[in-house]
């Protein structure tokens, strides 16, 4: 299983990310967790962010064991924001993992990502 991680900080304007350092978080994720890579974007729901997400999803077309984990706002909001990108790429919905990383620190985000990875690698737990 490969896990590619994309992170968003809502343009750095949201108080939800005031205790997060997205300059160091991708390195922390790659160093501490079993992820293929981690990348941060200032606004994944913006034009450039959606283009990046589409590129990542299309690159994984021929990789059936790849999951794309998006750490950003609430999962319900991500469902709405990324619906067109998922539809356009045909990326499997069950391999697109939405994770809320708001209102915590880098350590809190690491814990949330770690827990999500455990749920993905433990078949009896839903993700």
Image (cartoon, helix red, strand yellow):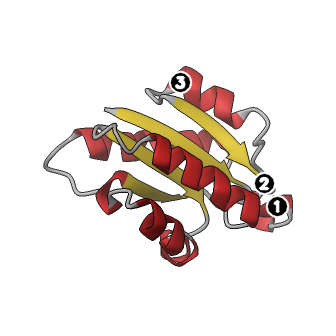
Pointer 2: residues within 10 angstroms few (<14), some, or many (20+)? some
Secondary structure category for the residue under label 1: helix
Q: Is residue 68 left or right of residue 41?
A: left
Q: What residue is shown at x 67% (from left), y 27% (from top)?
A: 27
Pointer 3: residues within 10 angstroms few (<14), some, or many (20+)? few
Report the residue marked by disc 2: 42
Q: Position of residue 71 (x, y in %)?
A: 57, 53
- The answer to which quarter of the image holds residue 91 is bottom left
Q: Position of residue 62 (x, y in %)?
A: 34, 39
Report the residue marked by disc 3: 32
Between marks 1 and 2, how big is the CA–CA gap? 5 Å
Q: What residue is shown at x 84% (from left), y 58% (from top)?
A: 12
Report the residue marked by disc 1: 11
Q: Position of residue 72 (x, y in %)?
A: 61, 59
Between marks 3 and 1, how big is the CA–CA gap? 25 Å
Nearest to viewer (mark 3 / mark 1): 1
Q: What residue is shown at x 13% (from left), y 49% (from top)?
A: 124
Q: In the rendered structure, which disc, 1 or 2, sits on the residue that comes first in sequence? A: 1
Q: Are marks 3 and 1 in contact (CB under 8 Å)?
A: no
Count every numbered label the image shows and give the total. Answer: 3
Instruction: Note whether residue 59 is visible.
Output: yes
Q: What residue is shown at x 30% (from left), y 58% (from top)?
A: 94
Q: Position of residue 106 (x, y in %)?
A: 67, 41
Q: Are marks 1 and 2 in contact (CB under 8 Å)?
A: yes
Work out which quarter of the rendered image holds the C terminus and state it: bottom left
Pointer 1: residues within 10 angstroms few (<14), some, or many (20+)? few
Q: Depth check: 1 or 109 in front?
A: 1
């Amino acid at each position: 299983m490969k896990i590619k991680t994309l992170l968003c900080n809502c343009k750095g304007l949201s108080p939800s990310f005031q205790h997060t350092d997205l300059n160091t978080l991708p390195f922390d994720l790659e160093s501490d967790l079993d992820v293929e890579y981690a990348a941060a974007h200032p606004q994944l729901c913006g034009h450039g962010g959606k283009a990046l997400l589409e590129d990542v999803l299309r690159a994984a077309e021929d990789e059936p064991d790849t999951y794309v984990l998006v750490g950003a706002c609430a999962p319900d909001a991500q469902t709405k924001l990324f619906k067109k990108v998922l539809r356009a790429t045909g990326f499997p919905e069950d391999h697109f993992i939405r994770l809320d990383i708001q209102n915590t620190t880098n350590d809190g985000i690491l814990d949330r990502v770690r827990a999500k990875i455990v749920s993905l690698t433990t078949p009896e737990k839903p993700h």
